[in-house]
Image (cartoon, grey):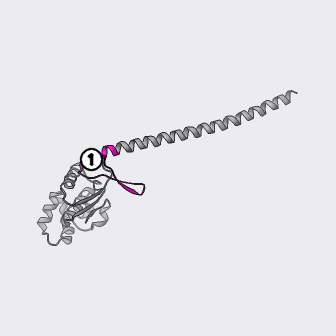
Amino acid sequence: MGVYQQHFVDRLPMGKTAVQHLRDRFQDEDYQSIRNRLGKYGLEGHAHEVTMRDLSGGQKARVVFVELSLQRPHVLLLDEPTNNLDIETIDALIDAINEFNGGIVVVTHDARLIEQCNCTLWVVEKQGVTQWQEGFEDYKSTLLREMEEKMAKEAELRRARLEAAAAVRLDKLKEKLVRLDARQIQERE
């Protein structure tokens, strides 16, 4: 199983270059094949020999994707894979996910990734997992409707509390007026 997690930086040796790291992990691969693959994944040639600490988040992500491809996994677990990626790389990732012949679990908040991948949508909430049969557009519409309903209920509760508080204040004012009137009557007598 290949795992890509949003905190992939913890896995990379910051003092090594992308080529050094990948050659250490995959000793069957030669220098040029590693560089070719890094280039295929969009890492510019000059960045192949730059230490990881000096690469951008997107460049580090490409190194991790190359590492995953060299593992040749049958199952991929991708946790927020679009973090740090530019639009072109997200498009390439979508193509790669759609072409992958194994199993894939993608955890994401990226609507574009969800919409463009030929995947089954599973919703994880309230300590459960549910397959969403109707598609992502229906899921978004359902979420919006539920949020609107919740906001309407909360507004109604707020209105009821404000009215109750106003009624209590009004009763107290009436009591004060009655006492004030009684005092004024006593003073006149």
**Could you say which is closer to the camera, residue 75 or residue 40?**
75
Q: Position of residue 161 (x, y in %)?
A: 58, 40
Q: Position of residue 79 (x, y in %)?
A: 31, 58
Q: Quadrant of the N terminus?
A: bottom left
The reply to whether the magenta stretch includes residue 131 is yes
Crowding at label 1, few (<14), some or many (≥20) Cα neighbours within 10 Å? Answer: some
Q: Is residue 61 left or right of residue 31?
A: right
**Could you say which is closer to the camera, residue 142 or residue 66?**
142
Q: Quadrant of the C terminus?
A: top right
Residue segment shown in magenta: 116-139
Q: Position of residue 181 (x, y in %)?
A: 79, 30
Which of the 4 image quarters holds residue 51? bottom left
Amino acid type, mark 1? Glu
Q: What residue do we see at 30% from left, 52% from top? A: 121
Regarding residue 45, the answer to whether it shows in the image is: no
Q: Is residue 164 left or right of residue 93?
A: right
Q: Is residue 70 left or right of residue 175?
A: left
Residue that carries the numbered disc 1 in the rendered image: 115
Q: Secondary structure at mark 1?
A: helix
